[in-house]
Image (spheres, rainbow, N blue to C red):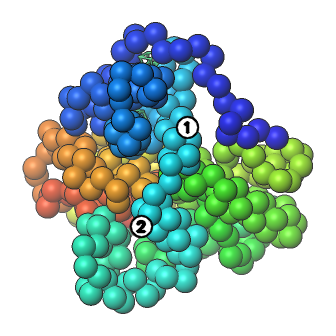
Amino acid sequence: MLEYNQYHPPIECTLCGRCMEVCPVFRATQREELSPRGKKFLLQNSGKYFLERKRVDYLAGLCAGCKKCLDVCPQKINLPLEIARLKSAHPDWKSWIWSRMITSGPKIMPVLKGTRAFIPSIPPIIDNALADKNLIPPVLQISGRISHTSRRAVLFPGCVALHLRPGLHEKAIHLLDALGFETIKTPDWKCCGYPLGSAGLFEQEKREREKNLQIWVKLGKPDIFVLCATCLDGLKNPFFSNSSLNAQTGFRQKLFPLIPDFSGLNISRSNPEESRTIFWHEPCHGSGQSRAALDNALSSVNLDLTMMDRNCCGMGGSFAVQHPQLSRRIADIFWQNMPSSRNNLVLTDCSGCIIQLEATSPDSFQAAHWLEAIVFTP
Ligand code: SF4
Ligand code: SF4
């Protein structure tokens, strides 16, 4: 079993600077001490140069967890993980609130929704997530059904799809049924672990991951289709569990992204007269499979999917809640240079990104999960 503390960067940072080109926090601030290289320097030298512990924690903690620095680092330095460890070693009251929100989400979400107008200083991103949503006009119409296979499947919707996006869970179940799966009723899944782990809440993450594994075993180890790219990333995390390595490996092997692959079903445009420009935002933790499948589906009805630059939208789990101004600045950069013509739609497959895109997009854009752009007809 792997534990977080078993990760050791192979060698120290060589100060090559490759991570600076990709870091959204550095791009938004142009401050070297907030770049991955600067953070690594701070972490390596926190005992020297009269650096105050609190100051080091604060500066190093300004991270959106996008992992872009890890992707490009020749030393394979996992800075998001080192930062999560730092947060774990120095928890604060905000971490406690975040932990309660995530692990008690199903119980408190309806209460928060009903009382959000009375909560003083509610972070803008939470306020927007809790607001009632106008459904977007669908783009594709899907009908038909593939004959039943013997494959059993269960959906992992993630807490956003389950509690904050009306109709998303039902559509996902409908799609699995249409694709011929024997779909099991969605159980009481716990958090995927990503928002807890990235906030350094390792014990809580461990508990939630362990419970998910036990739920899956109880269900008879079906295939798990995951609606959110970041949830999939969290569930696939190879670090620790009390269960055997075999059980963990088996669990990870049964995880699949729910992608817009409509092979064998009938597909048409919902409104052939309507002209919309459709963009794709690839989440930082995305696999690209949803984009490729959606591209195929749209081109089969003569619609295009335009890929946006692979920039971070600035959500980053607790980052947008703890650092709303910086998160907003990253989002503003994200939206720069986008067309101002009306009726643009951005689709993605990460629930967190949807909330951030929706909260920050210019008026000419709507943002949604790709499944919200689908309507099923008999
Ligand atoms: S994870 Fe992303 S935001 Fe954090 S330091 Fe790396 S590139 Fe910057
Ligand atoms: S890419 Fe890696 S080795 Fe290069 S400066 Fe960044 S953290 Fe250091």
Residue 303 appears in the picture as rendered: no
| Residue identifier under label 2 | 372
Which SS class for mark 1? Answer: helix
**Residue at the image position 48 percent from the left and 19 percent from the top:** 73
Which SS class for mark 2? Answer: helix
Say left or right for 129 vs 284. Answer: left
Query: Looking at the picture, which amino acid does disc 1 mark?
Result: Leu
Query: Looking at the picture, which amino acid does disc 2 mark?
Result: Glu
Q: Earlier in the sequence, mark 1 or mark 2?
A: 1
Q: Which mark is residue 178?
A: none
- The response on whether ligand 1 sits within 8 Å of label 2 is no
Say left or right for 78 vs 207. Answer: left
Vertical position of residue 8 compared to residue 91: above or below: above
**Residue at the image position 46 percent from the left and 80 percent from the top:** 109
- The response on whether ligand 1 sits within 8 Å of label 1 is no
**Residue at the image position 73 percent from the left and 71 percent from the top:** 183
Location of ligand 2 given as a quarter of the image: top left
Say left or right for 320 vs 360. Answer: right
The answer to whether marks 1 and 2 mark residues whose Cβ atoms lie closer than 8 Å is: no
Say left or right for 326 vs 256. Answer: left
Q: Position of residue 191 (x, y in %)?
A: 61, 64
Between 357 and 205, which is closer to the camera in this rendering?
Answer: 205
Q: Which mark is residue 81?
A: 1
Residue 32 appears in the picture as rendered: yes
